[in-house]
Amino acid sequence: MTYQPVGVGANHLLLQAATPVVDWLTGQLAEGMAVVLANAESRVLGRRAGGTSISRRLDELNCNPGFSFAEEHVGTNALGCVKESPAPVTVLGSEHYREVFSDMTGMAVALRHPIHRWMVGALSVTCRVEDTNELMMPILLSAAREIQSRMYAAVSMRERELLEEFLKVSKRTSAAVVALNQDFIITNTAASTILNPADHTVLWQWAADAVPRDGEYSGEVHLSDGELVRARVRAVGGAGGGSSAGVLVELRQAGAEERTRTVPGASFRDGVPLPGRSAAWKRALEELEAAERSEADVLVTGEAGVGKFRAAFQICRGNPSVVDAALASVEANWFERLHTALSGKAPVVLRHVDRIPAALTGPVAALLEAPKPARIIGTCTDVSGTRLADFFDARVELPPLRNRLEDIADIAPALLRGTRGRSAPRLQTPALQALMAQQWPGNVRELGSVLKSARVRAMGSDIALTHLPSEYRAAPTTRTLLGLKKTERDAILDALAEAASNKHLAAERLGIARSTLYRKMRALGIDPKRRG
């Protein structure tokens, strides 16, 4: 049996343990003092102020839930410094990096997971310099010990419950058995021979999305190496509306025929692989394969950074000529270069079709419409911003990374490998889970940039959570949504955006009742306090 931590998020555990202690601590402090609770990334989770004067001062300093006091954002301060210090930290007046904090005293102590010892948050007491009192630190330390004790009681109870269920099931089956939650994973020998560290995150994401509270679900899941396994998952604990201890998963390897049915990371033809296991990505690969076979002129669309250029290269056979329309406004002979490329026999990749200047739209349209020996594959981010999209025979839209977060388990290793044959570091499970919790507005390009930065910080070792840029380490405020739930959430957010947050109009656009919209917003973690 093996046991190890896998999660990065402990906000729920921290808040559950800290809230009554913070309430008590506030009552022990004199007027003019305040208590601040932050997560492991120095982002404020809550505060209690003793009096209106200190409350107004904290507002002026943006000390409100969601604000980050990380050193890279606001310079030297107690909440930021305690991340790097095993001991309590005190920062007095002018010791603060920024002058705006120079009239304040801050004291902070790290709060660590009682089992695994990683930092889950920080507790701070702050006041104006003239109100600093020598009793502040002893009271702060006492409160921190109480929070740690409460976290231990909560964690040990959940882990004991999960361990007992794991042992009970393991005794009566030869299957691979896995017990896990956001914080840790336990596997029997059969499971440890099947799984690698990347699979821990894959399993948790799949199980957390699949299993209902107090329920059971059977299905298939692709592991990080592409193997298809049958899995039965059920929740452990959580009866009567309480917090679930985790999930128990029984795994059985699929037969040879099933294992070869689909392979994550397989491309639509030989060559540079396009990794991914999601249904959205498989559909895109099927459409790319059909486009390649058709010999038609194809326009590959999608958000910036999704991989349109890479996909266009794969549709082409041979070595295509590349013409970038983003240079059309600065290269005097750009149109002639496009005309020359289209007159040859090699396929042409025309990048950034939507960036072609208006003055050249007509001449380029004439080239695309005229008979030509060369096949042309275009890429376009804003289809509505160009009239040239209609001059291509077919379109293939690539889905954004936020709609296929499970693919990150396949994409990240491929990006880290880079040049073929080059040794690459592995992503530790907490780092992978943090990456799968982001929304990636810059898509695969943004992911690649983050991984390059992390690789430099790792200096040849495996990439840990601490190697990621700070803004990518934070745990998600809500569990990642996959599949239909993710699509539904995006549809609601799009409708709210189109209706300027007016819920009545958004409900009409979606064809549902306003009460149904409110219910779905709550279920999908969308802020119900949106205007409208």
Image (cartoon, rainbow, N blue to C red):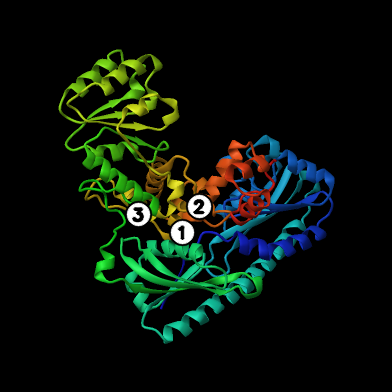
Pair 3/1: label in front = 3
Direction from residue 225 to residue 183 in the image, left or right: right
Q: Which mark is residue 410?
A: 3
Mark sitting earlier along the chain (2/1): 1
For mark 2, what is the residue? 486
Query: Height in image: 482 above or below 221?
Result: above
Q: In this view of the protein, can residue 130 be seen by the observer?
A: no
Of tags 2 and 3, the one toward the viewer is 2
Q: Of residues 421 and 26, which is closer to you in this image?
A: 421
Give me the residue at 50% from left, 62% from top.
Answer: 209
Q: Residue 419: percent from the left, percent from the top?
A: 25, 45
CB-based contact (under 8 Å), mark 2 and mark 1: no
Which residue bears the numbered disc 1? 430
The N terminus: image quadrant: bottom left
> In the rendered image, which quarter contains the C terminus?
top right
Residue 219 is situated, as x and y percent measured from the top left of the image, at 41, 68
CA gap, disc 2 and disc 3: 19 Å
Whole-Å distance between the Cαs marked 2 and 1? Answer: 22 Å
Image spot of residue 311 (x, y percent): 30, 40
Classify 10 Å Cα crowding around label 2: few (below 14), some (14-19), many (20 and above): some
